[in-house]
Amino acid sequence: MSTNFEQKSLSSFIESIKRILNLSAFKTTVDDIITEQYTRAIQDIDSELDLQINLVPKGKDLNFLLDYVNQNIQSAADQVADNIRQEIQRGILNGETTDQLAKRIKFLFKEKKYHVRIKAILRTETLRANNLGTLEGAHQAQASGLKLTKWLDVTEDTKTSKICHAEHSKYGTPEQAIPLDKEFVVKADNKTIKSQYPPFHVNCRTVLRIKNESS
């Protein structure tokens, strides 16, 4: 009976923690950031190519991206709640006091890995929004009669991943540009990475660039 009561109490406590960690209050801010990056990238393509044809955001793609980003952020918060549950269960099995359980939870909240993960998600998805906007703007521009291709602007330093080093070698100059509808394909660490645009991994910094073959 005691074990059953403890399990019910633990479940109730975890649900309360999840409600506290629910990041829906930040959804508007996140949506604004992602939308701004996506929309600005489309506007930049319009300006860069001097089209003056009023390129517009594609609502379906943007809405899908917004849902994807918010789900990733909430997933990080839910992981914290699950780890709290595991810590409490370990403490109960060890016969710890309420104060000892509280110290476990306090220590868990101090860990930086959760903050780092959320920041990485925001950084990565902001880049995704910008590159998606660039590609969408290019597709709209190409529909007006231009011949456009795409290449990758890779930041090369000690933080550059093997994936992006490979991307740079294969697609890193305007002369190595490929058609807009083709995927960038490279192999790194025995894995084949395929994508229409960056990011190619978490914390990716690679930027999609457009080349006007008509000029």
Image (cartoon, rainbow, N blue to C red):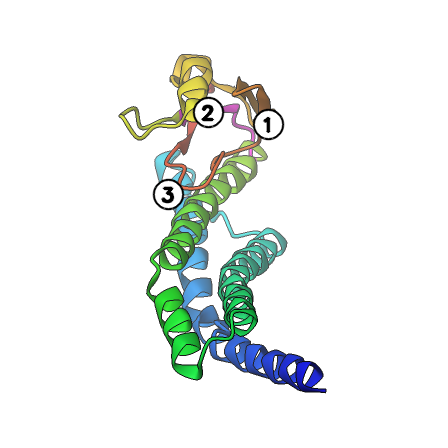
Disc 3 packing (10 Å; few <14; some 14–19; many ≥20) = some
Residue stretch rendered in magenta on the structure = 144-152
Q: Earlier in the sequence, mark 2 or mark 3?
A: 3
- In the image, residue 194 above or below residue 99: above
Q: Nearer the viewer, residue 151 or 164?
A: 164
Q: Which amino acid type is shown beneath numbered disc 2? A: Ile
Label 2 – label 3 distance at C-alpha: 27 Å
Disc 2 packing (10 Å; few <14; some 14–19; many ≥20) = some
Label 3 – label 1 distance at C-alpha: 25 Å
Q: Residue at x 40, y 41 (%)?
A: 203
Q: Quadrant of residue 101?
A: bottom left
Side of 1 where 74 appears, left or right: left
Point out the image quarter for the N terminus. Answer: bottom right
Q: Would residue 205 be seen by someone viewing this image from the given angle?
A: yes
Q: Assess whether residue 6 is covered by the magenta stretch.
A: no
Point out the image quarter for the C terminus. Answer: top left
> Which disc, if any, is residue 194?
1
Q: From the image, tell me which residue sits under label 2.
A: 163
Q: Earlier in the sequence, mark 3 or mark 1?
A: 3
Q: From the image, tell me which residue sits under label 3.
A: 44
Q: Which amino acid type is shown beneath numbered disc 3? A: Asp
Q: Residue at x 57, y 52 (%)?
A: 58
> SS at mark 1?
strand
